[in-house]
Image (cartoon, rainbow, N blue to C red):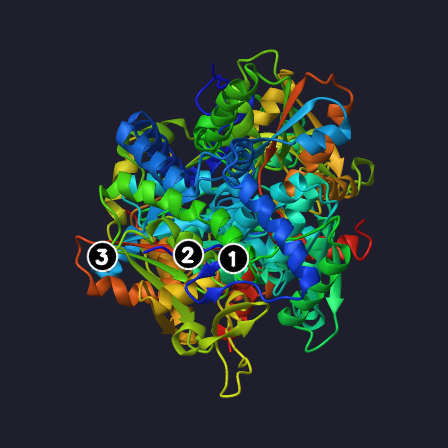
């Protein structure tokens, strides 16, 4: 199977339907991305920062206690939670900022929802001394004031977007508007595997370090490939990174885990959102439906185009878990392994608790722990102590 | 080389100033530890968890932009902030938890100040399936409610200590009392390079992985040893772990940075070497903040991890013999250190570690461009964001 | 009279030694004289005078709280010794100071020994200074004939018990429970053989302490030891000015069966 038949398309999904001003900017970005993605010097530098700054490679940890408790397949955890800033987000922002530097950008902009991508972006901008502006919905800035402070501490300017509902979608709109106006010296650093081409391909490229590592690590430990790889999916950046190297390995099941209250892939239909075609959770008239995930990072009615394609082509499986199951996964991993996962990652953990017992002890599965749960402790505290 | 001059002594410092009931368990601990230390299987198991669970080794990162900004010596950061649970504390907690299992103890007691050591210990106990009780001062329980919840999530029982000043030293008192009354089945995981022998040695040995790695890494990256190694000192566990492998390298300056709080001259500080006298607390002879009656005084620092009225015995010795130098950095300067590292490197350090960062920024400026400094970045600052907001308010740039 | 002779003469007269523990300065230093003289009048063998400390790790809640009250009254080792010296001529029984080590170090060991002797202190218990560490002050104490009393934990290995028993001065303080000070309702049943064992290592009187709180326990321990030390219960009674309880405890030591 060849996912990318035409640049920027995954079957019918992806592409770029944006105003021509913006298309010009995206064309320049695309050109640079393809110029540098396999450039030796570029990758040498990226790898240097992965190792020395982010702390890669991240371990593929055999969760012995969890495996015993489930009584089935061996469970391995890919520990993206150990990365600098606490999640997989840093992989992508590092890759893109190195690209931005080569493109001569003087200024970086980004959108953020709960603040994770904003903090990651502000982090690398601080490191490279590049001016940084983060667009964040006004509502989100109120709920996530700690992250606003962190971004400011890192020297970023945080713009509270009052338009629309003051949420992530509105922040994205503002960021694109900024880009169109200031493209000559501004780089838009998008955080998930969504948006118009070349963003989904670019984000996948930089996140695929997850599965490049895990494949080698798993082979070294088990002498074979895993039976399945599990990842949570919102926009889908950690999932596409965790899957990338296995897409052509047909014996490896790829399983996307969604919140049952933001079941884009499970219940959505093809549609258009933010300038690209993907599966969208929408009503009869094509209006995106509201989503209600307890994990801010999964609270999105669309999904990356490649995930959309992997669904329609039948290559990946899609399952949903309930909030209760997620909290159960969150607590179980904390208690039996001493690892407090991000609520997003706890979705994948939750499904592993169901899947592992159904598999043979000869099998092994990889669960992508996309981030650590420190950011969620307050929220879980409120939910559990109720 | 070793700095231990007699069993459990570092020069005059250290020792075993404990109730008689604890002597037998301490002797047993010493024996078990010596055996474990020599046992390749034990070291292999520890190494397994450090590699696959904690995520070691941690990078020795060349802080290029910080270096440029200061314009002096090259600054390298030893990235303990990238460890699982966010600080160097896990190195020791895991090592001691494995030791407890080896000794046939199924229960763990620990003290914690702000909660970092408590979280690390609760984590190790969750991983290794040990019962865990953590004593924490009532004041700290209030200030660090989320860390309490974190420990509970990890399956630990947190007991709030209302006595005395209701802070770290009172938590240590209670943990020691608990241990005395449950010695048959319980091991005490002390969190810093403090307490009665063999704790300072055990903690140092489990933390020396920091310095061992850094010493190899700097030679790989620079082809030589650094001119100076800098670390913050509260009880002193990250510092001793960082310093120890360099002690024999006479040309490497070792510098410990104590918390000067509001300033040494105000009396509101936690700098036991700078402002304390020799005395005994929690089982060891060391520099101690005390009044003329020998009563222990409260320490003051913006960073909970340095907020302890004494400093580990090996540091006292290294200070006396001049092998290591100790200086101090105020709360305000430490906050400057936080801002500096955030702005130049995109790394939010723990306020503890920021003491070392600030000191280094001053030191580096006085050194030559081809000189090298290694700073131990002992932990990440996520836990401190509330404190930073209170301290910096809207005035952060 | 040295501590040991005082103990031995009480025992020779057919009684068991009874040593109450008081926290100096609980209720203020002004009542210290009255408390000590009244205890002396009741016929106690010696009195253990506790010095408050900021970090009393070997003490349970009762004594710890008494210590906190004393600290709040501004009490410290220096002013306790000064107060004792004032009425030392009236005190005919030996006093045993019980203090954590650091106040002694801050005082200076030689100066402490001198002032303590003048205050009538003949014995010393330092709960956070095991035998191995005692050289830090032992010479200074010996010069003033202040006995350094060793606590012996009954669960320690035999060699250690033998070593501590041989090194103790004045009397041997047998810790009857693993743990900290404070009242207990239950003791291990097999304590008697431990005491017999202890007696075989040393000619010193052996006193039982930690957790003893009722006249029945005083009598029971008297049947296999040379006497008892009662701490928390006395501290509690003094705090409530309950001399009746104290009297009943002292009396019990006089009935204790002689073995």
Work out how far the residue at label 3 is from the one at label 2, CA to CA, in angstroms: 35 Å
Determine the image quadrant of residue B51: top left
Q: Position of residue A178 (x, y in %)?
A: 74, 60
Please tell me the numbered disc located at residue B281: none
Determine the image quadrant of residue A239: bottom left
Q: In the rendered structure, are the residues bearing label 3 and label 2 in contact, judged by CB atoms less than 8 Å apart?
A: no
The residue at which mark 1 appears reads as: A200
Subunit that carries the residue with mark 1: A
Q: Are marks 3 and 2 on the same chain?
A: yes
Q: Check the image and name the residue furthest to the top.
A: B250
Front of the two marks 1 and 3: 1
The residue at which mark 3 appears reads as: A73
Closer to the camera, A111 or C181? A111
The residue at which mark 2 appears reads as: A5
Closer to the camera, C7 or A319? A319
- Tell whether B261 sits left or right of A118: right
Q: Position of residue B237 (x, y in %)?
A: 54, 34
Whether C204 is drawn above or below B2: the answer is: below
Q: Position of residue B226 (x, y in %)?
A: 61, 18
Work out how far the residue at label 1 is from the one at label 2, CA to CA, in angstroms: 14 Å
- Tell whether A345 sits left or right of C202: right
Of the 4 image quadrants, the one containing the N terminus of chain A is bottom left
Q: Earlier in the sequence, mark 3 or mark 2?
A: 2
Q: Residue at x 62, y 33 (%)?
A: C104
Q: In the rendered structure, are the residues bearing label 1 and label 2 in contact, judged by CB atoms less than 8 Å apart?
A: no
């Amino acid at each position: 199977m060849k996912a990318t038949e035409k640049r920027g398309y995954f079957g019918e999904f992806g592409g770029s339907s944006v105003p021509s001003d913006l298309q010009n900017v995206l064309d320049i970005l695309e050109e640079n991305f393809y110029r540098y993605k396999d450039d030796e010097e570029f990758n040498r530098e990226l790898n240097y920062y992965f190792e020395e700054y982010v702390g890669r490679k991240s371990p593929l940890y055999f969760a012995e206690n969890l495996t015993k408790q489930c009584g089935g397949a061996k469970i391995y955890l890919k520990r993206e939670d150990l990365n600098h800033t606490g999640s997989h987000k840093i992989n992508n922002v590092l890759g893109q900022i190195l690209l931005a530097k080569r493109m001569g950008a003087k200024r970086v902009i980004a959108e953020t929802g709960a603040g994770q991508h904003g903090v990651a972006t502000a982090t690398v901008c601080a490191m490279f001394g590049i001016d940084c502006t983060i667009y964040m919905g006004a509502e989100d800035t109120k709920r996530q004031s700690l992250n606003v402070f962190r971004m400011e501490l890192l020297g970023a300017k945080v713009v509270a977007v009052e338009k629309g509902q003051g949420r992530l979608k509105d922040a994205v709109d503002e960021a694109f508007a900024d880009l169109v106006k200031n493209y000559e010296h501004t780089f838009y650093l998008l955080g998930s595997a969504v948006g118009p081409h070349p963003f989904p391909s670019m984000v996948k490229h930089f996140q695929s370090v997850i599965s490049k590592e895990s494949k080698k690590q798993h082979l070294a430990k088990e002498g074979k490939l895993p039976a399945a790889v599990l990842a949570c999916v919102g926009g889908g950046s950690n999932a596409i990174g965790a899957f990338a190297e296995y897409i052509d390995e047909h014996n490896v099941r790829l399983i996307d885990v969604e919140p049952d209250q933001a079941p884009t892939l499970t219940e959505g239909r093809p549609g258009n959102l933010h300038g690209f075609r993907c599966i969208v959770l929408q009503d009869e008239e094509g209006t995106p439906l509201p989503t209600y995930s307890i994990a801010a990072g999964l609270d999105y009615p669309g999904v990356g185009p490649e995930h959309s394609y992997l669904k329609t082509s039948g290559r990946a499986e899609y399952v949903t878990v309930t909030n209760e199951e997620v909290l159960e996964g969150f607590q179980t991993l904390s208690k039996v392994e001493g690892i407090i996962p991000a609520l997003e990652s706890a979705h994948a953990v939750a499904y592993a608790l169901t899947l592992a017992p159904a598999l043979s002890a000869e099998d092994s599965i990889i669960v992508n722990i996309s981030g650590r749960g420190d950011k969620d402790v307050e929220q879980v505290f409120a939910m559990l102590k109720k | 080389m070793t700095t231990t001059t007699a069993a459990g002594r570092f020069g005059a410092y250290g020792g075993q100033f404990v109730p008689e009931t604890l002597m037998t368990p301490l002797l047993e601990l010493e024996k078990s530890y010596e055996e474990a230390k020599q046992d390749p299987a034990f070291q292999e198991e520890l190494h397994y968890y450090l590699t696959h669970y904690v995520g070691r080794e941690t990078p020795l990162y060349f802080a290029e932009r910080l270096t440029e900004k200061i314009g002096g010596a090259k600054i390298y950061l030893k990235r303990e902030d990238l460890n699982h649970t966010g600080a160097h504390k896990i190195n020791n907690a895991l090592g001691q938890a494995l030791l407890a299992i080896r000794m046939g103890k199924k229960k763990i007691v620990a003290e914690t100040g702000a909660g970092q050591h408590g979280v690390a210990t609760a984590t190790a106990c969750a991983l290794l399936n040990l019962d865990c009780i953590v004593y924490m001062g009532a004041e700290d329980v209030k200030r660090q409610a989320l860390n309490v919840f974190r420990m509970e999530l990890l399956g630990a029982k947190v007991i709030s200590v209302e006595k005395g000043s209701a802070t770290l030293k009172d938590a240590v008192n209670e943990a020691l009392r608990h241990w005395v009354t449950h010695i048959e089945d319980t091991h005490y995981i002390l969190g810093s390079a403090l307490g009665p022998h063999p704790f300072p040695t055990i903690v140092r040995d489990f933390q020396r992985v920091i310095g061992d790695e850094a010493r190899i890494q700097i030679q790989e990256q620079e082809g030589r040893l650094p001119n100076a190694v800098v670390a913050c000192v509260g009880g002193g566990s990250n510092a001793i772990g960082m310093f120890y492998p360099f002690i024999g390298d006479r040309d490497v300056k070792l510098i410990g940075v104590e918390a000067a709080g509001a300033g040494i001259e105000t009396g509101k500080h936690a700098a036991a070497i700078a402002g304390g006298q020799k005395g005994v607390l929690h089982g060891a002879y060391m520099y101690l903040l005390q009044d003329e009656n020998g009563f222990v005084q409260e320490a003051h620092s913006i960073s909970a991890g340095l907020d302890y009225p004494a400093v580990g015995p090996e540091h006292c010795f290294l200070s006396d013999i001049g092998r290591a130098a100790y200086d101090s950095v105020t709360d305000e300067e430490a906050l400057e250190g936080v801002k500096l590292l955030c702005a130049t490197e995109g790394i939010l350090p723990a306020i503890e570690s920021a003491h070392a960062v600030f000191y280094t920024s001053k030191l580096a400026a006085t050194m030559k461009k081809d000189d090298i400094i290694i700073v131990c970045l002992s932990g990440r600052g996520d836990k401190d964001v509330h404190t930073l907001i209170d301290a910096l308010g809207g005035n952060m740039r | 009279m040295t501590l040991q002779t005082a103990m031995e003469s009480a025992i020779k007269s057919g009684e068991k030694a009874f040593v109450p523990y008081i926290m100096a300065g609980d209720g203020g230093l002004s009542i210290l004289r009255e408390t000590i003289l009244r205890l002396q009048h009741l016929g106690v063998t010696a009195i253990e005078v506790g010095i408050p400390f900021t970090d009393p790790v070997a003490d349970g809640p009762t004594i710890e709280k008494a210590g906190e009250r004393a600290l709040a009254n501004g009490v410290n080792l220096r002013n306790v010794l000064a107060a004792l010296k004032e009425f030392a001529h009236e005190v005919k029984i030996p006093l045993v100071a019980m203090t954590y080590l650091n106040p002694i170090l801050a005082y200076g060991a030689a100066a402490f020994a001198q002032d303590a002797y003048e205050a009538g202190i003949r014995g010393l218990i330092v709960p956070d200074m095991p035998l191995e560490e005692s050289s830090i002050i032992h010479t200074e104490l010996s010069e003033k004939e202040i006995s350094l009393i060793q606590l012996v934990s009954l669960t320690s290995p035999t060699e250690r018990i033998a070593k501590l028993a041989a090194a103790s001065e004045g009397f041997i303080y047998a810790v009857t429970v693993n743990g900290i000070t404070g009242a207990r309702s239950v003791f291990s049943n097999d304590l008697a053989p431990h005491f017999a064992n202890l007696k075989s290592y040393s000619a010193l009187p052996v006193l039982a302490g930690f957790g003893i709180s009722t006249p029945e326990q005083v009598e029971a321990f008297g049947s296999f030891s040379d006497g008892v030390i009662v701490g928390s219960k006395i501290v509690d009674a003094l705090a409530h000015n309950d001399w009746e309880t104290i009297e009943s405890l002292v009396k019990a030591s006089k009935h204790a069966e002689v073995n």
